[in-house]
Image (tube, grey):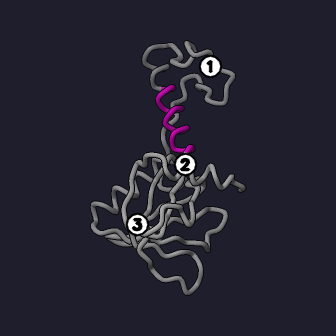
Amino acid sequence: MRFNEKEMVSLSRQPSEMAAELGMRGPKKGDVVKKRLVKLVVNFLFYFRTDEEEPIGALLLEQCRVEREDTQAFSIVFLDEAERKYLFECNSEEQCGEWVDSIIKASYEFMRKNLIFYRTEIHRLTGKDPLEQYGISDETRFQVNNGLQLMPRDTSSL
């Protein structure tokens, strides 16, 4: 996927949902854990050298799986490149849990599943489509299936 470098730098400077210095190991053989400033902005995980203002990289958090490696570490693996694993080491078990939860919730797919679920629930309870008032009809991609409840799936795999 291609990105405009200036726009990415601008996005990396936006307020973040989370930011911390974490240990990070890249996917290449021989990579070692290095301290990086890691920022979660929308559905991008930016990483910086601790003494620099511009990111050295970014991960688009779509079509990926987030897993706890141990109590203070988690990994991100992209579904189309299972051999490329990014490892992050946190300072505590609590911090690790917060990062995993935030990364899972950052993806477009997670938000889309929640929209479908809550739209279906509201329709079931009220008999009305909550998005009709915004001009979004049943023919859109977020269809409400008659009587069929859509439940959120396992969100550890996005």
| Residue at 56% from the left image edge and 66% from the top image edge | 56
Q: Which residues are magenta?
A: 108-120
| Residue at 61% from the left image edge and 29% from the top image edge | 142
As rendered, which of 57 and 94 lies closer to the eye? 57
**Mark 2 and mark 3: Cα distance apart in space:** 27 Å
**Mark 3 and mark 1: Cα distance apart in space:** 38 Å
Q: Earlier in the sequence, mark 2 or mark 3?
A: 2
Q: Earlier in the sequence, mark 2 or mark 1?
A: 2
Question: Residue 80 vs residue 94: left or right?
Answer: right
Disc 2 crowd rating (10 Å Cα; few below 14, some 14-19, many 20+) is: some
The kind of residue tagged 2 is Leu
Q: Tell me, for residue 31, which label it has, or none.
A: none
| Residue position marked by numbered label 3 in the rendering | 68
Mark 2 or 1: in front is: 2
| Residue 88 in the image, given as x and y percentages of width and height | 43, 70
Callouts 3 and 1 close, C-beta under 8 Å? no
Disc 3 crowd rating (10 Å Cα; few below 14, some 14-19, many 20+) is: some
Callouts 2 and 1 close, C-beta under 8 Å? no
The kind of residue tagged 1 is Ile
| Residue position marked by numbered label 1 in the rendering | 136
Q: Is residue 128 above or below residue 73?
A: above
Instruction: Label 3: state its secondary structure.
Output: strand
| Residue at 60% from the left image edge and 63% from the top image edge | 78
Mark 2 or 3: in front is: 2
| Residue 137 in the image, given as x and y percentages of width and height | 64, 18
| Residue 112 in the image, given as x and y percentages of width and height | 55, 37
| Residue position marked by numbered label 2 in the rendering | 11
Q: Is residue 109 magenta?
A: yes
